[in-house]
């Protein structure tokens, strides 16, 4: 019988899976962390390719259920641990907004930033999934202007996702440092668990050198 704490987390330090680690720790749950070395291509070994055939992190295994894709994992974990109060239930009015902005990260934010960083033409705005890079940025700025958090006064897993995203993308100059973005980022990354994970990620990165472009 699968229990809530029967969780294995597949992780490479200082990659997208760092956000999943922050979410797990903010939820206050027990899990086994399987750390891999990207430079040694441990994520390309047969055992891990059975978990994620793409060799990407993060991934989690809950009992016999495997979940890949960062946003799918975030949604799954929030619903698995409702007692933590970090995910609106289906019956709550905030649920739709919560899902909207989590999925916006994967569907619009990341594709726009990757295209921008690679100087790729996304094609006509009417055909690009995110419109244009500038449109994506403006939509996000508006979304983060309504309160301290994505859901206004309510803190959620969506904030851990976006706080982490803004932290890394502004660090590498992929997103403009608009006042709304910097204030929001600073508010989220100041959380004690966030800071503790970032510090320990540095320790892990030294033990398991990584290449974030592979995550």
Image (cartoon, rainbow, N blue to C red):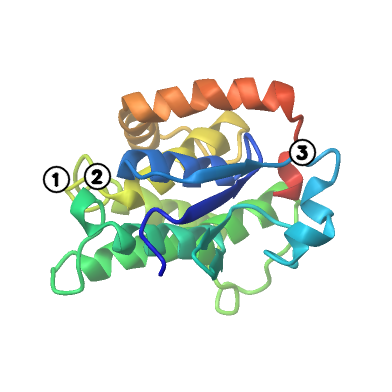
- Which numbered disc covers residue 37? 3
- Depth check: give the residue in front, 101 or 2: 2
Tell me which corner region of the image, top left, top right, bottom left or bottom right, holds residue 15. top right
Farthest bottom residue? 127
Q: Position of residue 77 (x, y in %)?
A: 38, 58
Kindly identify which residue carries mark 1: 153
SS for tag 1?
Answer: loop
The mark that comes first in sequence, 3 or 1, is 3
Q: Residue furthest front?
A: 1
For label 3, the SS is: loop
Label 2 SS: loop
Q: Residue at x 51, y 37 (%)?
A: 176
Label 2 and label 1: CA atoms lie apart by 6 Å
Crowdedness of circle 3 by 10 Å Cα count: few (<14), some, many (20+)?
some
User: Mark 3 against mark 1, which lies toward the viewer?
Assistant: 3
Q: Residue at x 35, y 45 (%)?
A: 29
Tell me whether the residue at label 2 lies in contact with that at label 1, contact meaning CB atoms closer than 8 angstroms: yes
- Find out whether the residues at labels 2 and 3 contact each other: C-beta distance under 8 Å: no
Q: Quadrant of the N terminus?
A: bottom left
Q: State the image coordinates of residue 39 (x, y, percent, origin top left).
A: 84, 38
Q: CA distance from mark 3 to mark 1?
A: 39 Å
């Amino acid at each position: 019988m699968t229990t809530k704490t029967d969780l294995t987390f597949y992780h490479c330090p200082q990659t997208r899976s760092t956000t999943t680690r922050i979410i797990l720790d903010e939820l206050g749950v027990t899990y086994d962390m399987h750390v891999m070395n990207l430079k040694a291509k441990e994520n390309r070994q047969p055992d891990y390719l059975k978990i994620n055939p793409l060799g990407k992190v993060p991934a989690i295994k809950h009992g016999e259920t495997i979940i890949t894709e960062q946003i799918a994992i975030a949604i799954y974990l929030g619903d698995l641990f409702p007692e933590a109060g970090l995910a609106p239930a289906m019956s709550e009015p905030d649920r739709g907004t919560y899902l909207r902005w989590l999925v916006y990260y994967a569907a619009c934010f990341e594709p726009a930033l990757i295209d921008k960083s690679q100087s790729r033409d996304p094609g006509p705005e009417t055909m690009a999934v995110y419109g244009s890079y500038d449109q994506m940025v403006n939509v996000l700025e508006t979304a983060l202007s309504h309160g301290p958090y994505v859901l206004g006064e309510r803190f959620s897993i969506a904030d851990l996702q976006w706080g982490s995203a803004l932290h890394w993308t502004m660090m590498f100059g992929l997103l403009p440092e608009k006042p709304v973005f910097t204030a929001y980022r600073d508010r989220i990354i100041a959380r004690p668990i966030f800071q503790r994970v970032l510090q320990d990620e540095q320790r892990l990165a030294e033990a398991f050198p990584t290449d974030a472009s592979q995550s």
